[in-house]
Amino acid sequence: MMLLKVRNMKSIIRNAFLILGLAAFTTASAQEVIKEDSVKTVVQKPIGQKQKIDGVIAVVGDYVVLDSDIDIALIELSSQGNSVKDITRCQLLGKLMEDKLFAHQAIQDSIVVSDAEVNSMMQERMDAMVEQIGSMEKLLKYYNKSSEEDFKTYFFDILKMNKLTTEMRNKIIDEVEVTPEEVRTFFKKFPSEELPQFGAEIEVAQIVINPEVTKEERQKVIDRLSEFRKDVLAGNGSFFSKAVLYSKDEGTKSNGGFMRVNRKSPLVKEFKDRAFSLDEGEISEPFETEFGYHIIMVEKIRGQDVDLRHILLIPKVSDQSLQEAKDEIIGIRNKIINGDISFANAARNSSDEKETRANGGALMNPKTMDQRFELTKMDPNLYVQVSDLQEGQVSQPVVDEDRLGRKTYKIITVTKRYGEHKADYAQDYLKIKKLAETEKQIKTLGEWTTEKIKETYVKINGEYRNCVFTNNWLKK
């Protein structure tokens, strides 16, 4: 694989962001095959770069790589905080060619990525990019595109190719598994001095109490949503404007509550069930999810996808309900401190957080999918809450507020602390297993790449033919 030779365990960890092609840039533009004698074209470069004649420097199957693709890759890697001082243009070309080989083979293997799926992904990414850069005008200027439609055409091709690349890569490695014996063999092959040093880690558990919402407040929200629905159906205002003015979903309200969803969208079941039960133009009655109360209007049904708009309202919590929640969690803490009940059993019996309740309140690290958090890589808010807690100590009640503005009370405990240490087979088995699995995946992908290069049309032009590639792109 490009940019990565697995010499020791430290190198696997150090280069983790490049493993399996997950480098943090999306720059390769998908285009039609260019003939060998194709004339060069002038392509606008991102802001801050000198203009020059931009030509096709490589062809892989049905895709090409332009010289400017490498420039954009370097800019985007730098903008995301990655060091590029040791990354050469030859290495980036190898990476871009790998991506295109995967995308090309995905098409040969009839892997389908629908236009609707890409369009949905594109809108989400564009919204994030506009938020980061400040405005659509600045985004168009950065990429030297004349209009939003021009940029969408350009970005659509990029996203579709990247999605094909990911699907093909996942197809190859999905079946890769490692046995306990393979993990042991992987660990034993490294000398002691080459084993990595793992930072201090902790395991954390919490109990959450949500303030009770009164029936009166729930009914107020339901009645208001019903009024919105009635107004729109009667032509007294648009759904778009009401979503912009009143919806509590900050992620969609600026776009009039618009969403494109399918059965695979990461949304709660109640929301998807209601969305797929409506006809075009129909507006749902108010319904409840864990986030609050919604109404949905379906704009267009596109096969497996549904274009819709929604409005979210959240019932208010009274000061009395907040105080009752605080009193309840203080009582739970006192029972734990007095030894009347363990923290884990108190979480199972009383916590309102369903994701952690059954597991005794234990938090799962979303990056590693285990219960250990490295202190230097923790979410800053969580770090502040647990950094001074000793093992087994229970925090004072903490008020938490989510992105929707809903307040809860919680108590936290550190169930176990691990000091900084050199990799240990028993203590760090899950980490070592992941590294062993990664090494095997890299080997599998490398073998696949070697075979597919032999049977795929590949051409490299100009000075890039002097590059030294990890893969045999020049077919020598």
Image (cartoon, rainbow, N blue to C red):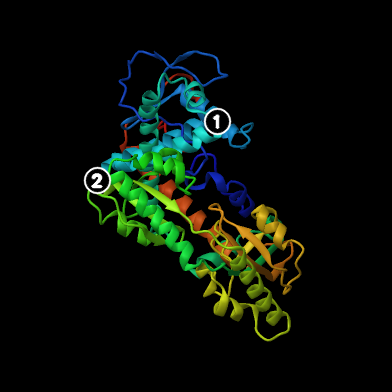
Locate residue 93, reporting x and y percent.
48, 30
Image coordinates of residue 106 in percent, x first then y, are 31, 43
The Cα–Cα distance between marks 1 and 2, rounded to whole angstroms, is 35 Å
Q: Residue furthest bottom?
A: 340
Q: Identify which residue is drawn at 59% across, 32% down.
A: 79
Residue 424 visible in image: no
| Residue 354 visible from this viewpoint | yes
Work out whether mark 1 precedes mark 2 in sequence or the reverse, and give the earlier one.
Answer: 1
Numbered circle sitting on residue 133: 1
Closer to the camera in the image, 224 or 211 = 224
Q: Secondary structure at mark 1?
A: helix
From the image, which quarter does the C terminus lie in? top left
Residue 233 horizontal side relative to residue 52, left or right: left
Residue marked by disc 2: 281
Q: Position of residue 297 (x, y in %)?
A: 31, 48
Q: Position of residue 187 (x, y in %)?
A: 60, 63
**Kind of residue at disc 2:** Gly
